[in-house]
Each structure stands twice: as structure tokens, then as C-alpha cells.
Amino acid sequence: MIDEESRTTVLRRAATYQPPRSWRTWLLGRPLPTADAPHQTIGKKVGLAVFASDALSSTAYATQEMLVVLAGAGAAAFVFSFPISIAIVILLAIVTISYEQTIHAYPNGGGSYIVSYDNLGRTPAMVAGAALLTDYILTVAVSISSGVAQITSAFPDLFPWRVVIAVGLVLFVMVVNLRGVKESGSLFAIPTYFFVVMMFITVGVGLARYLAGTLGVVTDPPEIEMIHEAQAVTFFLLLKAFSSGTSALTGVEAISNGIPAFKEPKSHNAGITLIWMSSILGVLLLTITFLSQQIGAVPSVMETVFSQLARTVYNGTGIMYLLMIAATTVILIMATNTSFADFPRLSALLAGDGFLPRYLAFRGSRLVFSRGIIFLALVAIVLIILFRASVTALIPLYAIGVFLSFTLSQAGMALRWWKTGKVMRGEQVDELHAHATPLHADERWRLKMIVNAVGAFLTSIVALVFAVTKFRDGAWIVLILIPAIVFTFNTIHRHYQGLAKSLSLDSYAAPPGIMRKRVVVPVSGVHQGTLHALRFARSLSNDITAVHVSVDPEQTERVRQKWELWGEGVRLVILDSPFRLLHEPLMDYIASVAEHRQPNEVITVVVPEFVPEHWWQNLLHTQAALTLRFAFRSMPDVVIMDVPYQVSHNNHPQKVST
């Protein structure tokens, strides 16, 4: 077609290239066309497996983390675990109602980041984004470490190998998620529902035996884990136990971040999935904590509280115990799927706004943000290795980020409902800023504003309690890390803004046309690749200079003799380098040429590069062309052109008569 305004011819053509089958196809699946994106969405049942596994799996360690803190006051303090769990479930209900409102107000997803950006501004949005990214990374590290703890509880001989096992599991989940959201969700749906069924069977049998008076207590309990000095039961101790137990709420925000992954109607399906998840989570947390208190379970690094509960309920380590431990282990591993689903999406949003590298916003061959998935896995592996796959060591870093994002999200929603109250019925208000969502009149805006305001107040208190009570245990790391991440966001954003300004065509005046070209060809030796580059240089200009850096007189003499024979009359400059430096003398020479160039003259450096037949053969060569290419890129007013020459054993030099 022809643009009538500029008379520019624009041609459109469909690419005929088809990705070939390879080991990546076998491992990750065949590449999917962009048109398949709408078919990769998921329903409520699969959505529960993808986005709720994190929250549901936390029931396997939330009770234990409460007991670890209470153990400082002795086993008698364990009686407070159930009232604390009730307080946590009340907070869960408030947060759930708040996020259910967020899902319908922001049907395109984005969760805390988008809500904060739309209502509170850019800086709070960056804080929310940093907090969530940190939480997603820690979710992977904590969930995998907790899953490995379940394995070592059943098979103590594997305890020394816990870090290796954890790293292997992270890599496994990474590969599954690289295959796509729909495929990973379908694969993880069965283990998730198996866990839910086994959990309800276990707590159901446990409650029935408790009511019948046959439940009993833990036999051969492990040695109690004491991470704090003995102390009395104080309000501060109870707050600390409460903050550890609130790790059960991590993952509640995941569904609001991943709304685009659901089938239509997206908001409706996501909202129902959120209610399902919170209901299951609340029931399991209460019953597990209650039964653990009744059987006298104790926190221990050698055997988890849940393992003690399962073998007490089933009178030993029979088939039902093993099935329960297997289900728990699998769901803890699958819990990382929530982070692998949401971390790349949030990273893509931040990248699209210029706060993270742009390449994180590109979808891979399976229509997922594959680079974000790989980055998440690598950082989580580093944490697992540093903290030796210890859940107790990682928990102090956990949850503070998610409660900070809870607070910002709900404060943003409260402000949104306040602004909604000013909108007349039938009117729509469009705000002109990034991620803005139109405001519509809502008769229940006061009630919704109160719900979100109360939620923001409570979660801010929890975040503060967490920061204070866990500060010495490692929470200070997160309190430093989040501002550091926000600083990084700002630095990246300034770079992209400066780059856009430098590349902008606004008020752009085209420079004078290029009148003259001077070509420089670095020559290390005279061979077919050199002559190939020389012929290309001749197509650019008649002003050509070959340059050879001399570090070996004998080698230089051979180059001179060959150049007289094959150089086609092009002048050769030999730079003597007494200190055997190769790149520095060449760059100094080109800089001097560029400094004395004529107006409207371009200096072009044509770099010969031979390409071996097989990739591994590159390891046998110094890759001087690659080094030169990167070195020259920093020189102003100099154009670098790489001229590859494919080398094959079937290539034979042509004889030329002299």
C-alpha cells in the first residue's frame, strides 16, 4: 500500500518461517502463535490451582511458625496459638473482601501496583511493586524449603541433601512454567486438589477422634526448637507469634494480579476463585492449629508440626500418613507456581512503564514472560543456598513485603471510592495518566471505602508489627532491600527517559548528508577472511587504510609480504606496540583519525571475523573481532561494521596468478 500523506510505499508480508523442532521443543513444547493467546486462558478450577496454591500451602507451616515463637515462653504458651489463628482468619476475611472489590474495579489485573499507581501516584506504586516482587521471590524460596522439610521429616537420611533437592525442585517448576500458563495449571491442578482432599480428610478424622476422645498425643515428639531465649508470655511475644502466623495470608493478592489469565467473564471468575481460596484457607488454618494444640505438637527442625499431626491422627506412619506428607510436599512445591505466574506479569508491567529492563515485557515462544520466569528461579535459588533451605531463617524476610503491598492497595482503593462518591449517576470520569481506570458512580461507595480503609489500617499495623518484632531476626534486610529496589526502578526509569529524549524526532533537523567515507580495516593476518572484508570495504569507499598492530616482528614481516601480494594496492599502516598491546594502539590510531576527519566525513571500521563451522570451535580462538567490536562501540563519530566469513573444511583457497 502507499501512504497518501508521505507517498511512502509500505509493504506487508506474512512470514513463512516455521520454528524447527529441537531439544527446546521437546522440553518446553512447540512455539505458539500470538493468535493462540485467547485460548491460553484458564477457568476457576484451574485458576485455583495456579493462583491459590501459595496461600493454601501456607497452612503447612503457618502454625509451626507461631509455635516456634511461643516456644520461647515454654510449651504452656502454645495455648495461645488458637486465639492467634482466629485473629489471623478475621484479618484474612477483611483482606479478601477488599481484594474482591479490587478485582471488579480493576478487571485488567495488576493488583497492588496498578491500584497504587492509579490512586496514590508513581512512588507508592514503585514501593508496592518492589514489595510484591520481593514477596514472590521469597514465596518460592520458603515454599520449596518447606516442601523439602516435609520430605526430610519422613526420610531423615535426606536432611544433608535438602539444599540440592530444593534447587532441583525450583528448576523443575521453572521448566513447567516455561511451557505456558494453561499447561502448567492443568498439570498442577491434580496435586492441588489432592492436597485439599487429603487435608480435609486428615482434619476431619482428627476432629472426629478428638470428639470421640481417642485422638491422644504425639508419640516420641522431636526435640523442641528454641530459637529465642526463655521469656515470659508478653504482649510483645504474642504480637511476634501473630506476625509469624500471618505468613498464611501471603498469596491472597495473587488472583487480583492475574485476572487476565482467567476466561471471560474474567472479574467474575477471579472473584469466585478468591472466595473459594480464602474459605479453604481459613478453615484449614483454624482446624490444624486447634488439633496441633490438642495433640501437644512441638516445633522442630527435624520433624514438622504437620508431620506430627498426621502420624498422630493416623496412628503411625502408614499409607495415609505417607499420602498426607506426599500431598503436603507437592502442594508446597506447587505453591511456587503462584509466584511463577504472577512475578513475570508484574515484571512485565513494571518493564512496560520503564522501571525494569524492557526485555522483561516480551512474551516467549509459549506466550509467557519467559525471561521473568528464569530470573525468578535464579534469584530464589541464590536465597535457598544462602539460607540453607531453612524455613525459619527465611520467614523473617517473608510477609512484610506483602503486608506493605496490602496496605498500599487498600489505601488506594479507599481513595478511589472517595473519588467515586463525587461522580454523578450515569457519569464517567476518565483520568489522564498511566493505568487510569474510569470512575463510575456507586451507591455503596461509603461502605466500600470503610471496608478498604479498615483493611488498610489493620494491614499497616501488621506490617509495622512484623517490622518491629522480626527486625533483629532479619526483617531489616527487607526494610533496606525495598528502598534499594525503588532506587533501582528510578535509575532505570531515568535512563529510559533520557534515551527517549535523545532518540526523539520532535524538533529533529536532519544533519547534512554524508559527503565522504573513510574506511579502516584492522588486519591481524592475511587470509581469505581478510580479503572478504577488504572487498566489502571497497564497496563503501576508495579511501581505505589497513592497520596491523605489530607485537612480533617476524609475524609482521609475513603480514607485510602477503599484503604486497594480496592487498590490491590498499595502503597498510603498521603500528609498533612495544608492550604487546593489541587493542589500545588500534583504538588510539582510530581516535586520531576521527579527530582530524573532515566535515561530513564518516569513519567506518570494517572488522573481519571468521566464523567456524561448529559453535564449540569458537572456544579455540581468541575472538579478537568480538573484543574490537565492543571496544569501538564507545568511540564517538565512528561506525563499526562486522564482516563475518564462514569457514568450512570444504572451503579451499583459490589460486590467483601473479
Image (cartoon, helix red, strand yellow):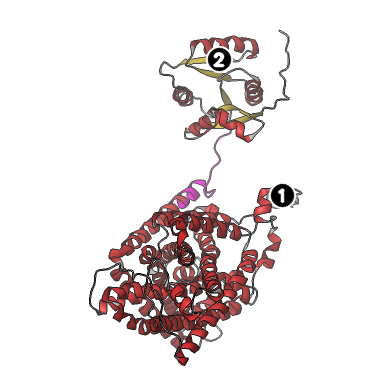
Q: Which residue is mark 1?
A: 19
Q: Position of residue 188 (x, y in %)?
A: 60, 68
Q: Residue at x 61, y 17 (%)?
A: 526
Q: Are there few (<14), some (14-19), or many (20+) residues within 10 Å of tag 1?
A: few
Q: Residue furthest bottom?
A: 212
564 relative to 212 in the view: left or right: right
- Find numbered disc 1 in the image and state the secondary structure of the residue it sits on: loop
- Label total for image: 2
Q: Residue at x 71, y 18 (%)?
A: 653
- Give the alpha-carbon distance from disc 1 to disc 2, as whole Å: 45 Å
Q: Which mark is residue 359?
A: none
Kind of residue at disc 1: Pro
Q: Residue at x 55, y 20 (%)?
A: 524
330 relative to 410 in the view: left or right: right
Which one is in front, 602 or 309? Answer: 309
535 relative to 244 in the view: left or right: right
Evaluate whether residue 304 shows in this view: yes
- Find numbered disc 2 in the image and state the secondary structure of the residue it sits on: strand
Q: Is residue 599 magenta?
A: no
Kind of residue at disc 2: Leu
Relative to 522, is 37 above or below? below
Q: Position of residue 144 (x, y in %)?
A: 48, 63
Q: Which residue is mark 2?
A: 572
Q: Are there few (<14), some (14-19), or many (20+) residues within 10 Å of tag 2?
A: many
Q: Magenta region: which residues?
A: 496-513
